[in-house]
Image: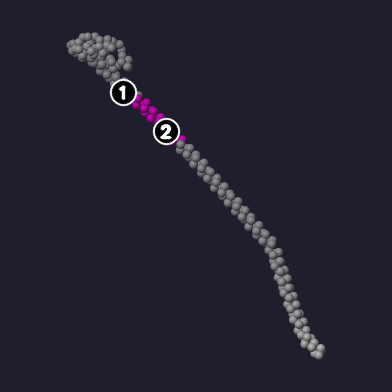
Amino acid sequence: MYLYLGRFYFAQRQYANAAEHLRKSVSKRPDASGLAITNNAHLLLFQCDSALGNYYQAIQHYQRYKYYNDSMFNVAQARQISELQIQYETEKKDQSLQLQQQQIFLREKDVLLLKRQGLLQASRLRQVELEQQQNLLDAQRKDQDIELKEKTSPSLRRTRSCNRVSWKGSTHAQRLIRRRGFAAGHHRAPDQRLSPQTTA
């Protein structure tokens, strides 16, 4: 409030009244939030004392103005540095979190890939086992077929030899029958030729 009154009287060129109200505004030690008010008040007091010819006091107010101005600058700079530091830490944490998430994602992807490879290998092993079992069964069947052929081949040979013998025997018998029939017919022919003479 005193600062606004000091500005009003300063604008009206009532430098004494302005200086009186401005001194009241800087009577207390300012805190961080009141640095700007105190700084502006010392600058106006410098101008008022200069206009009134109080050069020594004007210089003191100017020095205080510079001090508070530097303090404000340092506070602003410190605040900016603090904000930048906070921003840097936040970005660093975010990057670290993103990196961790990427690493987790890559690990999960590797685990999933290993699981798939394991399932694929297990499937291939199972297929190989089945093929081996099938090959073993095929080999056993071939062995059984060979054994069965070896067992049955002598009987087949015997059956074939018996059939050949019986066929040969029947053929020989047929030949004998034919021969006998031919011979009987040959002997009967003269008897038939003689029979008319005998009847005559």
**Residue 152 at x, y percent in the picture:** 69, 62
Is residue 48 at all visible to an observer of this figure?
Answer: no
In what quadrant of the picture does the N terminus appear? top left
**In which quarter of the view is residue 100 placed?**
top left
Residue at mark 1: 77
Which of the numbered marks, if any, corresponds to residue 91? none
Toward the front, the furthest residue is: 200
Query: In the image, what residue occupies the spot 74% across and 78% down?
Result: 178
Question: Could you tell me if the residues under marks 2 and 1 are in contact, i.e. CB atoms within 8 Å?
Answer: no
Query: In the image, what residue occupies the spot 30% across and 16% down?
Result: 35
Query: In the image, what residue occupies the spot 32% across and 15% down?
Result: 31
> Is residue 97 rendered magenta in the image?
yes
**Residue 95 at x, y percent in the picture:** 40, 32
In the drawing, does residue 118 fall left or right of residue 24? right
Task: Check disc 1 and report its element: helix, strand or loop.
Answer: helix
> Is residue 37 rendered magenta in the image?
no
Give the crowd class for mark 1: few <14, some 14-19, many >=20 residues within 10 Å: few
Residue at mark 2: 98
* Main secondary structure found in the magenta portion: helix
Residue 88 vs 116, above or below: the answer is above
**In which quarter of the view is residue 38 placed?**
top left
- What amino acid type is highlighted by mark number 2? Gln
Q: Nearer the viewer, mark 2 or mark 1?
A: 2
- What amino acid type is highlighted by mark number 1? Gln
Residue extent of the magenta highlight? 83-104
